[in-house]
Amino acid sequence: MDAFFASVELLHYPELRGQAVVVGGRSVHQPVSQPDGSKRFARLRDYVGRGVITTSTYEARAFGVFSGMGLMKSAQLAPDAVLLPANFEAYRDYSRRFKAAVASIAPLIEDRGIDEIYIDLSDFAEDSLSLARRIKQAVLEATGLTCSIGITPNKLLSKICSDLDKPNGITLLDMADVPSRIWPLPARKINGIGPKAGERLDRLGIHTVGELAAADEELLIRHFGRTMGSWLHQVAQGIDERPIKTSREPKSISRESTFQRDLHARLDRSELSTIFTDLCLRLADDLARKGYAARTIGIKLRYADFHAVTRDITLGQPTADALTIRKAAGECLKRVPLEQRIRLLGVRASALFPLSQMAVPVAASQAELPF
DNA sequence: TCTGGGGTCCTAGGACCC
DNA sequence: TCTGGGGTCCTAGGACCC
C-alpha cells in the first residue's frame, strides 16, 4: 500500500490532500474542530516529546522526513507539516479490507504485516499487466486507496519491484531482466540487507546488486559466514525459492512502552511498577484474545543510552495468567542492572501453545508430577 | 530534543543427555 | 594421564523488517 497510514488519514481529512502530512507521536494532538466547521491541525513545529514518524505523505517526503525519523528532528526539516496521531484501529480495518479485496481475486496470500502482502499468481493464465490492474482496481474500490505491485518470478524480486514505481505503480519483470533492471540497484534494496550488512558490503567495495553478483562466493562466506554468504550470492542473481506461506502460528507476543521521560528503578519505583504490571496485564489479555498460552516469559529494557538488554525464563507449564506472567517477569527483572535510567520497558511471551490444544498436555504433565 | 511498537530469524555458548 | 560425537533446550544479543 502507498504511504498507508497517511493515505488512510487523507480519506478522513480530504482537505489535507496535497499537503505535507506525517503520522506519528503520542495521541495528544487530535485535530480540533473550529467554530466555522473547519479543523485546526497540529503542526510538526508544535510537537514536544518523544516519538517517531510512522508514515509521511509523498509531499512530506520531499522535505526529507521519512518513517522512523524522530519527530523533533523532522520538525526542523518540515516545521509546517501537519502532524496526525496514529489511529491503528482504522489502519487494521483498512488492512483487512484491502487483503479481502485481493483475496477475492487471488486467494493464495502471504501476510507481510499491516500494509504488505505476497500473492501467488502462478496458476493464473491471464497476462500480468491486466491482472495487476484488476487487483489494483479491486483494492481501490474496497478502500479508496492505491497500492504498488511488482509481478516477477519470486518474492525477492517482487519485493524489490513493488517499490520501483511507487506510488500507484506496476512493475513487471522476469529473470532475463535481472542484469539490466536489478543489478544497477544499491545492494541495500535487497530485503534482508540492512544498514549493517550494507555498510560491510560497502567496505568490500560492493555497492550494487550487480557488484554483489560478481563477487566471489567464498569471499562472501569468509566475511558473512556460510549461511549469510551463500544467501547473498544467491539473491544477487535474483534467485529465491521461498514459497508463499499462506498461514503461520505466531512465535511470540509482546508489549513494550517508551516513557515520556527516562525513569530510575529506585527514584521512580512506583511509576515503573505500575507500568510493568500494566504491560503484563495487556500481554495476558493479548494471549487470551489470540488463544495462546506461553511457556517462556521475557522482559526487555532499554536504558537512557539506548543500549538494550533482555532476560527470559522458561516455566514448567504454559501460562496466560497475568499474575503468573507478572511474577515471572519480576524474576527476570532481578537479573538486570538497574543503576542507569530506563527509557523503555517491555514484556514478551514466547514458546506459545494454542489454548485449543492445551487441555490434554496439561493434564498429562500434571499426572506425571510426583505429588 | 535524537531514535515507536510489533514482530522474525540467526548465532553462540552452556547445560544436559545418550 | 584424559576426555568423542551427536542431539536438544535454554538464554542473550543483534540484525532486520513493517
Image (cartoon, coloured by chain):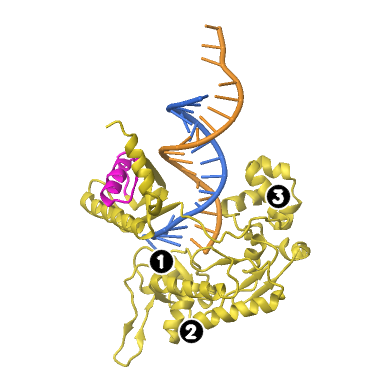
Chain colours: A yellow, B blue, C orange
Under mark 2, the amino acid is: Arg
Q: Position of residue C7 (x, y in %)?
A: 55, 34
- Which residue is outermost to the bottom? A36
The image quadrant where one finds the C terminus of chain A is top left
Residue under label 2: A17
Local packing at callout 1 (Cα closer than 10 Å; few below 14, some 14-19, many 20+) is: some
> Upstream in the sequence, badge 1 or badge 3?
1
- Are dots 1 and 2 on a single chain? yes
Q: Position of residue A42 (x, y in %)?
A: 36, 77
Which of label 1 and label 2 is nearer to you? 2
Residue under label 1: A72
Tag 3, which secondary structure? helix
Nearer-the-camera pick, A252 or A211:
A252
Residue under label 3: A233
Q: Chain of mark 2?
A: A
- Are dots 3 and 2 on a single chain? yes
Could you tell whether A120 is left or right of A332 in the image?
Answer: right
Whether residue A130 appears in this view of the structure is yes
Tag 1, which secondary structure? helix
Under mark 3, the amino acid is: His
Quarter of the image for residue A50 reads bottom left
Which of label 3 and label 2 is nearer to you? 3
Local packing at callout 3 (Cα closer than 10 Å; few below 14, some 14-19, many 20+) is: many
**Circles 1 and 3: CB atoms closer than 8 Å:** no
- Which residue is outermost to the right? A176
Q: Position of residue A325 (x, y in %)?
A: 30, 48
Q: Chain of mark 1?
A: A
Nearer-the-camera pick, A6 or A47:
A6
| A324 inside magenta stretch | yes
The residue under the point 22% across, 48% down is A267
- Are dots 1 and 3 on a single chain? yes
